[in-house]
Image (cartoon, helix red, strand yellow):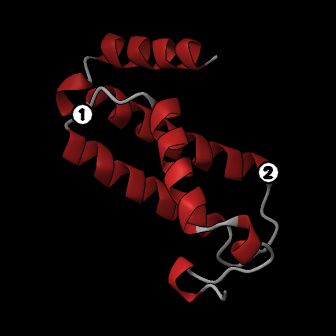
Amino acid sequence: MVDEVDAALREFVTEREWDQFHSPENLAKSIVIEAAELLECFQWQPDPPRETVAGELADVLTYCRLLAAKLDLDVDQIVLEKLNTTRTKYPVEKARGTSAKYDQLQD
């Protein structure tokens, strides 16, 4: 499915000749802008319409995928690597049931 989505994104961008505008800096800015629009869905309502959230989340994920492709990063690989790092910082026996930051976890 990931390959299918990435291929569809490449085709979409290529057809419109938008790659020229997709510098890593511009893509990173777009991620933040779209993330703010996603957050705006929840600004005044705890349960916004699902389709609105889905649309904004899709925008965030699209720009994340485009940035990863631009930087030649494998999305699944970097997520799994980060998960392993985070797993070490938040061991189950200390982190279960708490939202405390890793340096505030109790022994």
Q: Residue 3's image quarter?
A: top right
The picture places residue 25, in percent across and down from the top left corner, at 20, 47
Q: Which residue is mark 1?
A: 22
The first of marks 2 and 1 along the sequence is: 1
Name the residue furthest front.
Answer: 107
What residue is shown with label 2? 50
Residue 72's tag is: none
- The answer for how far apart the CA atoms under marks 2 and 1 are is 29 Å
x and y, in percent, of residue 88 in the image: 55, 60
Identify the amino acid type marked 2: Arg
Identify the residue at image location x=56%, y=81%: 101
16 vs 92, nearest the viewer: 92
Number of numbered discs overlaid on the protein picture: 2
- Residue at 64% from the left image edge and 16% from the top image edge: 1
Q: Nearer the viewer, residue 29 or 1?
A: 1
Give the structural element (helix, strand or loop) at label 2.
helix
x 45%, y 20%: residue = 9
Q: Position of residue 39 (x, y in %)?
A: 58, 66
Disc 1 crowd rating (10 Å Cα; few below 14, some 14-19, many 20+) is some
- Secondary element under disc 1, as helix, strand or loop, is loop
Q: Are marks 2 and 1 in contact (CB under 8 Å)?
A: no
| Amino acid on which disc 1 is placed | His
Q: Considering only vertical position in the picture, is 62 above or below 42?
A: above
In the image: residue 72, left or right of residue 97: left
Give the answer, above or below, for where 50 lies relative to 89: above
Screen quadrant of the C terminus: bottom right
**Measured along the vertical axis of the image, is residue 46 above or below residue 71?**
below
* Mark 2: few/some/many CA within 10 Å (<14, 14-19, 20+): few
Residue in the picture at 39% in, 58% down: 32
